Image (cartoon, helix red, strand yellow):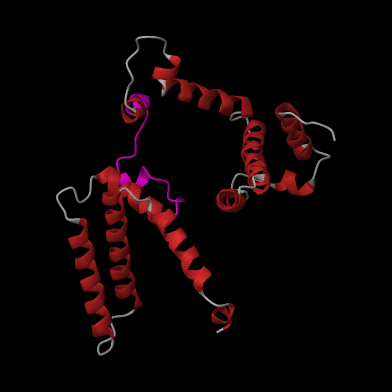
Amino acid sequence: MEKYRYEDFLRIVARLRAEDGCPWDRAQTHGSLKTCLVEECYEVLEGIRLLEEDGEGDNLCEELGDLLLQVVLHARIAQEEGLFAMEDVVQGISEKMIRRHPHVFGGDGQLVQAWEDIKEQEKNGKEIPARIQDQVPRAFPALLRAQKILKKYGYGRQENPFEQMERTLEGLRGLYEEEKTVPAGKEALEQAAGNMLLAAAFLCNALGVQAESALMQAAEAFSGDLPAAEFDK
């Protein structure tokens, strides 16, 4: 079997994007590849789950390759647009890792700086969005984005997360009971349910738990306990 290296893969992707390359690959844009990128990220997560369950790494290896393809494709498209190339991506992340780990690359006697302090230094000279919600990517899964927004805002520092959760649940329960006699409409229920989920994200922050991961594990455990017939109803 022929052995391929990183440089070979870059040439393969460039060939696919060439004028006489693959019509599908040539037609792709940053926008058209967004769904593919999200799907491949979740495929990697599934590969990690399988690795943790049975100790086999073949699936994870394959899915990491698919994710790498997405990265290289985006870089190749950007190069064709005159924006940047894969070499710039590698250069940028290499510089960042060295800059953020002075205790590893800084030599003897250099003090270790906190990760957040170094990140703050990197922001100097960069335009930071005024609104906190604009500082957290909107493409993040909802629970993950909620946790990051709450953390940036410092929401609930004086709040008891369990009391906050109870208040939002009580509000949702009251609206649900009213709905039986005086329909409030889906919009009101959706807003109340959203407040409850936001409180859950706040609680997870307080507990040091990743809400997205916790919910994924709970859903997996729940579905694993259901008989197949339940899904046919």
Q: Is residue 64 above or below residue 220?
A: above
Residue 137 belongs to the span the image colors magenta:
yes
Res. 141 in view = yes
Is residue 176 magenta-colored? no
Residue reaching furthest top? 108
Location of residue 20 by image quarter: top right
In the rendered structure, which segment of residues is drawn in magenta?
120-141
Q: Residue furthest front?
A: 54
x, y percent for residue 14 = 74, 34
Residue 199 occupies which quadrant of the picture? bottom left
Q: Position of residue 186 (x, y in %)?
A: 35, 77
Residue drawn at 75 percent across, 49 percent down: 24
- The image quadrant where one finds the C terminus is bottom right
Q: Which residue occupies 21% across, 56% down?
A: 161
Of the pair 225 and 156, the residue shown nearer to us: 225
Residue 51 percent coordinates (x, y)? 59, 48
> In the rendered view of the protein, which quadrant contains the N terminus?
top right
Q: Could you say where residue 123 lies in the image, as x and y percent from the top left?
A: 36, 28
Along the horizontal axis of the image, is 167 left or right of 43? left
- Magenta segment, principal secondary structure? loop
Seen at 58% across and 77% down, the residue is 228
